[in-house]
Amino acid sequence: MIKIDDFPLTRVPQNKKVSFLSVAIVHMGMLTALDQFMLGAVLGHSMTLGDAFIAIAVGSLIFGVVTFGLGYAGMREGISGSLLARWCGFGRLGSVLIGLIVAVSLLGWFGIQNAIFAKSLDVAFGNRLGFGWSAALSGSVLTILVTFGFRALRIAARIAVPLFIALVGWVSWVTLSGHDLHQAIQRAPAGDAMSISAGITIVVGGAIVASLMTPDLTRYSRNSGQVLGITLLTIIAGEFIINGLAILIAKSLSTDDVVSIMSLGAGGLGMMVVVFSTLRVNDLNLYSSSLGIVNAIEGLTGHKWRYAPTTLAIGVLGTTMSVLGILDRFVDFLTVLGVVFPPVIGIMLIDYFLLRTHRQALDESRGNGRLPDTTPAIGLPAIIASVIGAAVGLLSNWGVPTITSLVVACVVYWLSSRLFTRRLAVA
């Protein structure tokens, strides 16, 4: 059984490697969730069928390449993504900043998922509570449960994942069999039109955090073939099956409202699964975000904050984001993720596979089953290149933003690293 918090600061020993399915099931769970169904519904509501699947195909290709690259590095070195970043350009402090950005993004996911939970709760009570009070209530209860521990919640979360996948299949059958599929396919977008480039960016944004977390899982894998299989299965299940069905359902019902889709397709059962799926995802979002912030503060200041008060504070922030309407900014949120994270991943891949700045130290220490004796303090070229790439992707109006940010960051990092190396040689 995989425990992500095992060996947090060391290599995974060879005798602790696990089977292909043990890693694949956990990795697939990151993209077979409610947020991917939401993403597909947005694509189906805002794009033609052909454009939506082009966005999924191109976005999946980008996700697949960077995920396999990072996953392979994590498998080869047996270390997590945050540790890998230390010897892939960013250094110790740079990797802390990456962890902090991941934690903040998970906080945003908490706010979005809690907003969906709140809508379900409000509908269940006949709209008597109102969205604001429902969001405050659901966020507060979940925060308390995660902070102080509630084993039944974790048991329910394990049930929610297969139940959600089964419900998606059921809702798809009920909805699509009751509509003229050919007519739905030909139907023009019912919502605000979205370009293919924007669609590609939000597809990448919806999955890119999972890409960055892939080494945390594949460090338990035995070979590159397993990493490739894990990546392909996740893309097929999350991007093409979950997203694809959501696109067709959104077109058939002319809505991207997940709560409406589930309630119309499966009634009370659908509402229950939305609630439990949200609980499952937000349990992990809040837990991981809290750990990330605690670790970041410890890495920057040397002071270790206690988990419970940190979780309470983050839960309050996430709940406030729900009440203020972060769900209405879902597409904007995905766009930011799809532009900010690719530069970080691209730089790590460039450093590990091409520049190989610390590969000798990693190779020598790997033979002894330990980490390199020295750790770079901070990688300024990597941080600067990440900022430049993200800024160009967000501010420019040409090309596909997620590809633009990735390419610009990689080029800037490559050139700055080569220049920095030459200056050291001259000195």
Image (cartoon, helix red, strand yellow):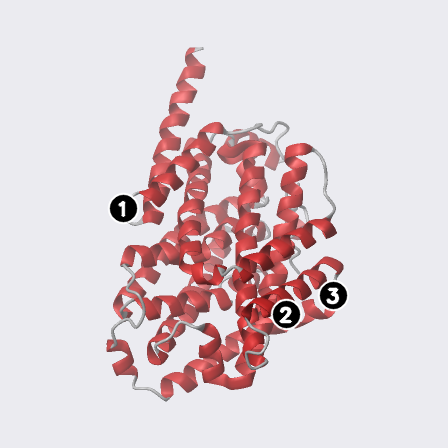
Q: Nearer the viewer, mark 3 or mark 1?
A: 1
Q: Quadrant of residue 320?
A: bottom right
Look at mark 1 in the image and give the residue it sits on.
397
Q: Quadrant of residue 286?
A: bottom right
Q: Is residue 237 above or below residue 68?
A: below
Circle nearer the N terminus (3, 1):
3
Q: Secondary structure at mark 3?
A: loop
Q: Nearer the viewer, mark 2 or mark 3?
A: 3
Q: Are marks 3 and 1 in contact (CB under 8 Å)?
A: no
Q: Quadrant of residue 132?
A: bottom right
Instruction: Report crowding for label 1: few under 14, some 14 to 19, many 20 or more residues within 10 A (C-alpha).
Output: few
Q: How far separated are the C-alphas under marks 1 and 2? A: 43 Å
The numbered dot on residue 158 is 2
Going by the numbered disc 3, the residue's amino acid type is: Phe
Q: Position of residue 109 (x, y in %)?
A: 53, 58
Placement of the C terminus among the 4 image quadrants: top left
Look at mark 3 in the image and give the residue it sits on.
150
Whether residue 15 can be seen here: yes
Q: Are marks 2 and 3 in contact (CB under 8 Å)?
A: no
Q: Position of residue 191 (x, y in %)?
A: 32, 69
Left/right of residue 293 with respect to residue 70 in the rendered view: right
Going by the numbered disc 2, the residue's amino acid type is: Arg
Which residue is painted at 63% across and 35% down in the image? 371
Left/right of residue 93 with respect to residue 383 in the rendered view: right
The numbered dot on residue 209 is none
Going by the numbered disc 1, the residue's amino acid type is: Asn
Circle nearer the N terminus (2, 3):
3
Left/right of residue 124 with respect to residue 391 in the rendered view: right
